Image: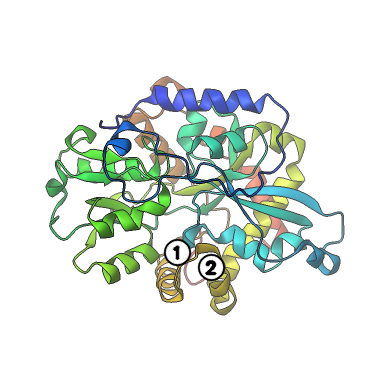
Amino acid sequence: MRLRPTSARLATLLTLACCVACTPAAPPPTPTSAPPAPATTAAADAQAKPSAAANTTPQVFTAGAAPQQAATSCNGQLRKLTIGVAVAPPNVVHTSPFVARGLGLFAKHCIDANIVQFEGGLSQTSLTAVAQGAAMGPLNESAIGAGLKGKQVWGMAPKPPQAYMVGENIKTAADLKGKRLSAAGGGVGSFNWVMGREVLKTAGLTVDDVQFISQGTAGRLPGLVSGQLDGVALHPEDVFLAMKQKPGTHVLINLTELVPLYFFNAYGVSDDFLARDRALVRDAAAAMMEANRAIYQDKARVIPIMVEATEKPQDAVEFAYDALTKACIWSVNTGFKPDRTAWTVDLAVSNGDIPADKKPGFDQIVAKSLGDEALATIGGPTTINGCND
């Protein structure tokens, strides 16, 4: 079965999320030892899967700075907040919340952060957690355009950090015809599916010309190395490991070249959450802005946190760190620019991910004043090593 794009599918998912939003907020998820859930598509069931299927139960991260740090850095009452991360375990680019916790930056802002890892930023569980006001987490333009009542409050990584990696026998995008591509982290509409579609367009191909495989995000690298995937968007640390583990795999195109104005990752909250506790959202955004600045300025302290969070070898993490900082992937300010948001929305409309008559504007997507307030609390805008998003 090939996975096809439908705005109806996303709308259905968001209807569920928004319905949950009408119920009282659930307590933060707790760790579980349950086995991974089975793959959710017939395509995945019918084939040998590149890895274990996704575990759709959020995983709780407890390492890092303990709440007692607040005794020396917080002048008020400690507030609890659940922070969602788009991948389990996270990629290096997703480690900003872990750095904020590990360096005591959440505690400095009187926040006891509970970090929860989801299987894809557009997964049902992640969107539901944001929609119901139970978490501050990844929130993209398509979700808002499809009806989720929320706002982006901080652009963690405006630029896409990944490269589209392919097997040795793939020389051009045209060679992907008939091949198996990753749809990790949510199937249709997931980031890997969207990027795979964009790569196909460069050769005049469509999603009907290939087979997308729905899988857990942890299966991206093993799938390529084992030869069960022919194309997948990989983060820099996994690019490093892929070329090391299977010589001949190579970068077909870097996504910053393929879609230079695509908005990669923004954090958001529901409108109700923002109205209910604006100060908490502002302070959490400020803490993570400070974390991004620390990432650029204090490699020795942040690398151990990244290694622990990602569960990746240190050489791979350092490779990714160098690539990400050189390319200014992490924001140092709010991360928002209207032209980037507008371009990403236009792409979603042209692809049918957002209905044309429901196309949201920048102010419908971004709580700009909130981001500006958070930025002001840490000294205002700055530039670090030429990076100024």
Question: Which SS class for mark 1?
Answer: loop
Q: Nearer the viewer, residue 296 or 1?
A: 1
Q: Position of residue 241 (x, y in %)?
A: 34, 68
Above/below status of 355 relative to 230: above
Q: Position of residue 9 (x, y in %)?
A: 41, 25
Camera sees residue 256: no
Q: At x 85% / y 66%, what residue is drawn?
A: 71
Q: Nearer the viewer, residue 261 or 27?
A: 27
Q: At x 72% / y 48%, what residue is drawn?
A: 81
> For residue 328, which numbered disc appears in the image?
1
Where residue 193 sits, quadrant-wise, is top left
- The kind of residue on which mark 1 rests is Cys
How far is mark 1 from mark 2, CA to CA? 17 Å
Question: Which SS class for mark 2?
Answer: helix
> Where is mark 2, residue-wise?
306
Q: Nearer the viewer, residue 359 or 270?
A: 270
